[in-house]
Image (tube, rainbow, N blue to C red):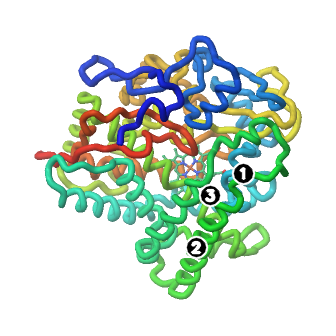
């Protein structure tokens, strides 16, 4: 199925050039010179959050809008992002009401949506379990799973059509299940876990209009009953997996569940069963679709840009010379890493980072009343022309070229920044680099003719509902 511009909220399109052009500008939605009224933007935001921005929103530094009763503050330069997410962390650590309402039924008091003492306690326990220093131990599981995908692709003939988005979602779900639950349990239960989560996601919507309009939080939401079933199913599966894990607790293999079961807080207390289930759900949810979307976008971008694809293949052929990469090879694949970084810049899987002000505060000298929604929008800042040269062009080399204009770490935030930075950053980067390295060594993917790809953001930023591409084995 092609992704029509209608899906993206506005029937007019923004940019995109063909592979023949010198610079490849991948697609983005139309940008307004003159903004339409707020009520029509709200309707559009529900369909696609990327389609509601004007030219000025990309360039601005600190903008605020009042939407009915709620003040919306958008930080779009490194200095104000730093002030909001680092300096003001205490006051701005609470996730937006939309995010909390969407995920609370599933994640309970899990790290991703908790705040204050609960968040601080959980972060201390959970972050070390998936920390960069543990990724070396998870890498063999990642590599084995990616090689299975390669073998599966190898059984398909030249030019066979695949849905690159579904394939990458399947791959990253398998990887995260096997790392959370261990190789065997991960394999046994992956399909059930994935089914439960996708059922849940179908019922939720990031843009909770009631909350955006500032209506009271106790007002009932309509979807309550609909999501009860998928939540129950996920909880039952997770409980079953943990019980099986405890029963067999064998081979000393690195697994997240093992880490959660063994974890102790400052008082030497273990996590409760509910907390373990919540955190396993957090890690599955946070670590699966984000990496899948990154890889799907990378395949699309590479398919449209001959120069970048050739550079990537040259690096893989030189460094790996036909063998599979190991964890130790990752630092020797700088261009592969730059492709992932550039993909995350152009299509950040989490395109909006929103917080609710827990008390009155200020950012950049502007007062921010309690209850305001403070946003960092990677979608805007990663394309801010003040910070980047040729911001809409796909050019991985910008991450390698010291002369290329780039902002500091507060201006490039696909993993967020500050104390709530993604706890799985190294995990996700390593997984994405290894996946691209192993698969792009042996295959080229071409976009199915006639497919119109447009970015759509609801919970995460995706190339629509699917990404039809054809598989072409490489003959090295
Ligand atoms: C390319 C892949 C990934 C991207 C782009 C990404 C991005 C993000 C972002 C933007 C946040 C903050 C969200 C917010 O502030 O609203 C976040 C949080 C988080 N991510 Fe990731 N993530 C990725 C992969 C992973 C993986 C693989 C894991 C686990 C293995 C993971 C675990 C987490 C956790 C636990 C949090 C919550 C941290 C907290 O609130 O303290 N992420 N991620």
Whether ligand 1 has any atom under 8 Å from the Cβ at mark 3 is answered as yes
Q: Residues within 10 Å of mark 2 (few under 14, many from 20)?
A: many
Residue 67 in the image, given as x and y percentages of width and height: 77, 28
Mark 3 element type: helix
Residue at position x 59%, y 18% in the image: 54
Q: Quadrant of the C terminus?
A: top left
Q: Front-most of 182 and 107?
A: 107
Give the number of the mark in front: 3 or 1: 1
Residue at numbered disc 3: 127
Q: Front-most of 132 and 450?
A: 450
| The disc label shown at residue 463, or none | none
Whether ligand 1 has any atom under 8 Å from the Cβ at mark 2 is answered as no
Please, is residue 419 above or below residue 26 in the view? below
Residue 124 in the image, given as x and y percentages of width and height: 69, 59
Residue at numbered disc 2: 238
Q: CA distance from mark 2 to mark 1?
A: 22 Å
Please tell me in which quadrant of the rendered image residue 380 appears: top right
Extreme residue toward the bottom, this view: 247
Q: Front-most of 358 and 323?
A: 358
Please, is residue 60 above or below residue 359 in the view? above
Residue at position x 82%, y 41% in the image: 215
Q: CA distance from mark 2 to mark 3?
A: 20 Å
Residue at numbered disc 1: 101
Which label's residue is closer to the chain start, 3 or 1? 1
Please, is residue 242 above or below residue 94 in the view? below
């Amino acid at each position: 199925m092609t992704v029509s511009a209608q899906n993206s909220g506005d029937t007019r399109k923004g940019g995109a050039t063909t592979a023949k052009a010198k610079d490849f500008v991948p697609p983005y939605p139309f940008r307004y010179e003159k903004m339409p009224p707020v009520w029509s933007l709200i309707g559009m935001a529900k369909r696609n959050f990327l389609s509601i921005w004007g030219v000025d929103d990309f360039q601005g530094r600190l903008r605020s809008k009042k939407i009915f009763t709620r003040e919306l503050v958008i930080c779009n330069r490194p200095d104000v992002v730093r002030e909001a997410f680092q300096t003001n962390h205490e006051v701005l650590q609470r996730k937006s009401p939309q995010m909390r309402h969407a995920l609370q039924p599933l994640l309970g008091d899990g790290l991703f949506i908790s705040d204050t003492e609960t968040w601080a306690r959980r972060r201390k326990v959970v972050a070390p379990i998936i920390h960069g220093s543990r990724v070396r131990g998870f890498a063999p599981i990642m590599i084995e799973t990616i090689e299975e995908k390669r073998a599966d692709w190898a059984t398909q003939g030249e030019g066979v059509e695949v849905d690159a988005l579904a394939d990458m979602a399947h791959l990253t779900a398998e990887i995260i299940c096997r790392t959370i639950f261990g190789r065997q349990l991960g394999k046994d239960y992956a399909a059930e876990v994935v089914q439960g989560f996708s059922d849940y996601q179908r019922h939720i919507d990031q843009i909770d209009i009631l909350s955006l309009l500032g209506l009271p939080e106790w007002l009932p939401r309509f979807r309550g009953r609909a999501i009860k079933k998928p939540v129950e199913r996920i909880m039952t599966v997770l409980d079953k997996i943990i019980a099986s894990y405890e029963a067999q607790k064998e081979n000393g293999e690195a697994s997240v569940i093992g880490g959660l079961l063994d974890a102790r807080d400052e008082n030497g207390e273990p996590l409760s069963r509910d907390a373990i289930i919540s955190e396993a759900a957090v890690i599955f949810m946070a670590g699966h679709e984000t990496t899948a979307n990154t890889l799907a976008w990378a395949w699309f971008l590479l398919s449209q840009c001959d120069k970048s694809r050739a550079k990537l293949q040259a690096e893989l052929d030189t460094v790996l010379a036909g063998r599979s990469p190991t964890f130790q090879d990752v630092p020797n694949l700088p261009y592969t890493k730059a492709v992932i970084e550039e993909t995350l810049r152009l299509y950040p899987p989490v395109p909006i980072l929103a917080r609710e002000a827990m008390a009155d505060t200020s950012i950049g000298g502007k007062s921010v009343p309690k209850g305001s929604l403070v946003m960092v929008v990677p979608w805007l800042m990663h394309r801010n022309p003040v910070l980047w040269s040729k911001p809409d062009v796909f050019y991985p080399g910008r991450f390698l070229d010291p002369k290329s204009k780039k902002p500091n770490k507060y201006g490039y935030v696909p993993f967020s920044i500050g104390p709530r930075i993604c706890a799985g950053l190294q995990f996700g980067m390593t997984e994405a680099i290894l996946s691209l390295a192993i698969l792009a060594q042996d295959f080229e993917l071409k976009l199915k003719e006639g497919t119109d790809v447009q970015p759509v953001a609801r919970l995460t930023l995706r190339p629509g509902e699917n990404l039809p591409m054809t598989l072409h084995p490489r003959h090295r």
